[in-house]
Amino acid sequence: MMTNQYKIKGQKRGAVMKKTLTCLLLIFSLLLSGIAFAKPGDADYSGLLKVSEVERISGKSKLSLKSMDSKKSGEAYDLQYLTAEGHAILMIQVLRGKDYEMFYQDYRSQDYRAMEYAFWGPKNATPENPPSQLWFRKGDTLIFIESGYDKAAKTDLNVEMMEQIAKIIASRL
């Protein structure tokens, strides 16, 4: 009897040990696959446009850059150029190039002919309410550039300034 009792306890311990090892192996393999397929940190788009370039183009000084990966953070923009008071004068988002047509249909007010696959937005832009957005695709990347608005509801950056910014970013893609 004693032998059977020890035999049963040993079998239970063996089963528990086997389940524990299986779980540990599964957790270990999931961790390894996560490491193998994970991106190395957040995407860093800050190299696309320097603060000094935005200051030169906009004529504003003491700007700062808030950089984040919008796909991970849930924020609307990857790059925001802010005044000392925290007002965003320029926002940039990096999107998938394959989504160009969808955004073109939803936001295009007119084509931007200086670049292939580029357009102005928003859709309701008029001469009295000029475009505040410039969208362009280069390769597999779609860039969305948006000007902030001042207290008088005018864009912080005019279309010429946004064009200069788009050309700098396009040269770095």
Image: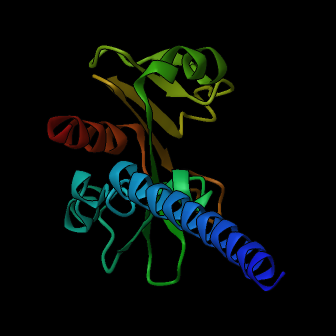
Residue 21 is left or right of residue 58, and the answer is right
Q: Quadrant of residue 96?
A: top left
Q: Is any atom of residue 73 visible in this view?
A: yes
Q: Is any atom of residue 156 visible in this view?
A: no
Query: Which residue is at the front of the view, 33 or 102?
Result: 33
Q: Percent position (x, y) of residue 15? A: 68, 66
Point 24% across, 51% down: residue: 48
Query: Which residue is at the front of the view, 71 or 17?
Result: 17
Point 79% across, 85% down: residue: 2
Query: Which residue is at the front of the view, 171 or 121?
Result: 171
Quarter holding the N terminus is bottom right
Q: Is residue 145 above or below residue 48?
A: above
Point 54% across, 34% down: residue: 131
Q: Percent position (x, y) of residue 160? A: 33, 38
Q: Percent position (x, y) of residue 94? A: 42, 42
Query: Which residue is at the front of the view, 22 or 27?
Result: 22
User: For the view shown, which residue lies furthest in the right direction?
Assistant: 1
Residue 131 is left or right of residue 97, and the answer is right
Q: Is residue 100 above or below residue 56?
A: above
Q: Percent position (x, y) of residue 10? A: 68, 76
Point 36% across, 54% down: residue: 39
Residue 151 is left or right of residue 160, and the answer is right
